[in-house]
Amino acid sequence: MSEASPTTKGAEKFLIAPILVLVMAQIGTTGENSAMSLAATAFADAFGSTTADFQLANMVYSLVAGALMIAGGMMGIIIGWKKSFRIGVLLCAAGEVVVALSPSMMLLTWGGRTLVGLGASFMIPAVLGLIPNIYHSGKNRAIAFGCIGAASGIATILPILFGVLMDAMGFRITFGILACYFLIVFAASFSLPPIEKAPGKLKFDYVGTGLAALGLFMFLVGLSRISVWGLIAPTAAAPFSLLGFSPAPVLTLAGLIVLAIMMFVEKKVEAKNGCALLPQSFYKTPQVLAGLLCSFQIFFSSAMITLLVVPYLQRVAGWSAMQASLIAVAIGVPMFLLALGIPKVAPKMHPRTALQFGYALIGAGTIAIVLSISSDSVSALLWVGAVVIGLGEGCLSAHASNVVALAVNDRDASQSGGVQATSRNVGYAISIAALGATLLIGLNSGIAGSISTNESISPETRAAVAQHNVDMMSNENFVTAMAGVTTSEEEMAALVAANADARTNALRTTLTVGGVIVLLSLLSTPFVKVARKENEAEIATEQAKQPAVDTDSLQTEGA
């Protein structure tokens, strides 16, 4: 049964209650990832987990969510956005319960995190899909999208609470509270206004969904395991080899091939049914691609801090979870202020300008953090870098979703929530995978290179060290890990010095690589040309049955 749509779309008022519910949902998933970023020490104490285990726990959420969010965007159109939203919220709550009660890292990762990722694949596309159906005027829609972007900034403040809870009561209480939070969001969802389902009977694209899920899963798993299974030759940890090669790059390449096949199949599906899992407007419109890249980079840069900086502060510099959470606050407050403030204070700012400022600021902030790092501590530049990165992410968050919605018709704008959410999770996953591999490879190769020329270290000790995969750890923990390698105090001192130099150089190099990847996105900003839509009262009906962009309803910078 279709839900009724609002009858007045002219001078509509900005509805406060709906955006609060959607913001709460966005805060929940972003806050949950923030809590995970602080749990490295707690998981290590409870389960004896390593950095690779912790990376995998973070990765599984992005694997599941990234693989299924495109399907979630289409599912919302078919079953209704509110129903899809509620299903997602309940799955997230169930996932948090599993995390809180898990007796092992394996169940936590493949049970709890899988459920949360599955829930997010329903909920987050619904958040982005509900906005065009609730807010019809261009101004209100831009403010609503800005609020969703600001929600990520608000969520980064929550780690203060999470840090205190983890330090005082452990991770189980923390994730139990998150489960209760999602149940509150579920109850609040019944206050959302009635909206209209897509006209006609749409068919769910099972073939496209299967190909998208398989391709993304293979690509992300392969990329994430390069540091563990090997880049070319397989390591001892690899489950198998393929003609003498590591399975990681083979899986990555196979995933890309499946995704290419999916795009070919989807073109035929759209021509036949009038809709598809991945409409052509998503990848044939340069502005849409620029907007998706923007969403990708927000989460790529966020994961860069989560993966690289926070573990360093906790495991090497000796910061507590609560202290480390202050970094998230330093990023989150400016992010919140700009994401919410730009659409209201500077409504005439062209989205392209905001994106250019955003990328440049994230690059500058990353440089500051690189300069702040020493062998076992950080300088005050860390805080400067965190604030500047937050300002950059705020500029991107203010317009990321709206840039996509402006460039396509309303039906595709609603469905684009799944693709946008996928780009975010793929950004997060690729950051963890690529930068994680760079960090661990740099760390181990750095130690090997340093001790290879050190005459105070015997060949036997060098060979023994080569059998260990060194983790990001303090000097004290390194000595414990290497206790069986040598009994010589002189050799141990040389190994400790080599580890300190290697982890510093590896961290600086990896952060620099991440910053360069963000700055390269500046090349996409010239494609952002559509600044706003005209005929706001007729937006809900424009091109409802057409996949192409209605150029008459778009205003470019020269119009």
Image (tube, helix red, strand yellow):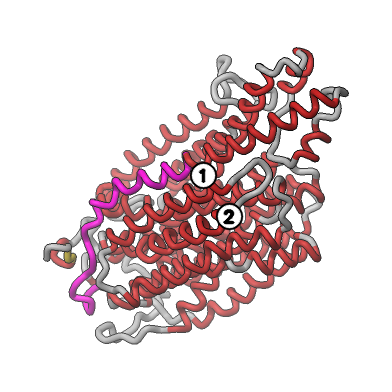
Q: Residue at x 77, y 54 (%)?
A: 102
In the displayed image of the protein, which residue is found farthest to the top?
459
- Please tell me how crowded label 2 is: few (under 14), some (14-19), or many (20+) other residues with Cα within 10 Å: many
Spot occupied by residue 311 in the image (x, y as percentages of width and height) = 66, 48
Please state which of residues 356 and 238 is positioned toward the viewer in this rendering.
356
Spot occupied by residue 206 in the image (x, y as percentages of width and height) = 44, 48
Query: Is the magenta region chiefly helix, strand or loop?
Result: helix
Q: Residue at x 37, y 53 (%)?
A: 360
List the residue tagged with mark 1.
431
What amino acid is found at the position of numbered circle 2 in the picture? Gly
- Mark before the other along the chain sequence, 2 or 1: 2
- Please tell me how crowded label 1 is: few (under 14), some (14-19), or many (20+) other residues with Cα within 10 Å: many
List the residue tagged with mark 2.
117
Q: Residue at x 71, y 55 (%)?
A: 319
Q: Residue 74 has which mark?
A: none
Contact (Cβ within 8 Å) of mark 2 with mark 1: no
Q: Which residues are magenta?
A: 513-540
